[in-house]
Image (cartoon, rainbow, N blue to C red):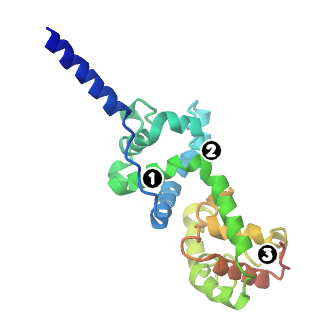
């Protein structure tokens, strides 16, 4: 009988040690992984959870009228309770399969294992992401040299004209598609009244972080993964030129 007690005690001890063992640390996400996850989040999640995870997406408003509250993903306490693996399960299996709302669809079959993991990692950063991104963009803005309008014009042609149009009036071919499909017009960047109200730092942040992170259109993509701070500053300088507005610090 003593040997049985010892075996049971050993089993309990081992089980406790395994449960207490820390999970292996995940490698820091690479910039391209963050960019993929951000785009996937905006495509699949922001409609309900909002572009910054505040539970204020367009669909959330309609759900609220039916008595369904979309969870806030910028709530660090909530996310800590669910845990990263819990978030991954919800993303992959949907709400109904994990004892949550059946309104939450299962995304695993659509996005695949790799992107689902990147999405889970991205969601876990939402409580800090807004302030961190804004601070990082501000630091990059202050650190980079003054922009060069001629360089900004070259960048504009390749990166912006498809939506905002060759002259910046919001009439590019992709912009017309956005209007037909989603009722969204790209910004007219020659509108002096609008542009005069924005500081250079405001424009830098919108280009760097994308519209969604600043409460604007989710269809304005973030360019910080493709363009460096000096290039973005040159874009801002070019926008000042075509909008006939002075630089504002």
Name the spot of residue 13 as percent of width and height, x first. Answer: 29, 24
172 relative position to 16: left or right: right
Q: What crowding class fits label 2: few (fewer than 14 Cα within 10 Å), some (14-19), or many (20 or more)?
A: some
Name the spot of residue 212 as percent of width and height, x first. Answer: 62, 58
Q: Nearer the viewer, residue 146 or 16?
A: 16
Q: Nearer the viewer, residue 164 or 237?
A: 237
Q: Give the spatial CA distance, label 2 vs label 1.
A: 16 Å
Name the spot of residue 1 as percent of width and height, x first. Answer: 14, 8
Label 2 vs label 1, nearer the camera: 1
247 relative position to 228: left or right: right
Q: SS of the residue at dot 3?
A: loop
Q: Give the spatial CA distance, label 1 vs label 3.
A: 37 Å
Q: Residue at x 28, y 21 (%)?
A: 12
The residue singled out by tag 1 in the image is 119
Q: Nearer the viewer, residue 148 or 112?
A: 148
Q: Who comes first in sequence, dot 3 or dot 2?
A: 2
Residue 236 sits in quarter: bottom right
17 relative position to 196: left or right: left
Q: Residue furthest top?
A: 1
Q: Who comes first in sequence, dot 2 or dot 1?
A: 2
Q: Residue at x 54, y 75 (%)?
A: 226
Residue 84 sits in quarter: top left
Q: Residue at x 41, y 49 (%)?
A: 25
Q: Who comes first in sequence, dot 1 or dot 3?
A: 1
């Amino acid at each position: 009988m003593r040997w049985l007690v010892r075996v049971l005690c050993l089993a309990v001890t081992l089980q406790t040690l395994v449960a207490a063992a820390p999970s292996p640390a995940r490698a820091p996400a690479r910039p391209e992984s963050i960019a993929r996850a951000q785009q996937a989040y905006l495509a699949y999640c922001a409609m309900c959870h909002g572009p910054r995870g505040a539970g204020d997406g367009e669909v959330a408003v309609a759900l609220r009228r039916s008595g369904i509250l979309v969870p806030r993903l910028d709530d660090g306490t909530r996310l800590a309770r669910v845990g990263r693996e819990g978030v991954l399960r919800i993303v992959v299996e949907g709400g109904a399969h994990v004892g949550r709302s059946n309104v939450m669809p299962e995304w695993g079959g659509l996005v695949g294992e790799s992107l689902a993991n990147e999405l889970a990692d991205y969601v876990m950063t939402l409580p800090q992401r807004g302030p961190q991104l804004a601070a990082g963009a501000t630091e990059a803005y202050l650190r980079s040299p003054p922009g060069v309008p001629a360089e900004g014009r070259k960048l504009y042609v390749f990166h912006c004209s498809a939506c905002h149009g060759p002259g910046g009036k919001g009439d590019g071919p992709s912009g017309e598609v956005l209007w037909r499909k989603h009722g969204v017009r790209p910004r007219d960047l020659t509108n002096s009244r609008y542009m005069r109200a924005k500081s250079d730092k405001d424009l830098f942040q919108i280009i760097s972080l994308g519209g969604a992170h600043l409460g604007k259109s989710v269809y304005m993509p973030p360019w910080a993964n493709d363009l460096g701070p000096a290039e973005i500053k040159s874009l801002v300088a070019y926008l000042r030129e075509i909008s006939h507005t002075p630089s504002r610090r």
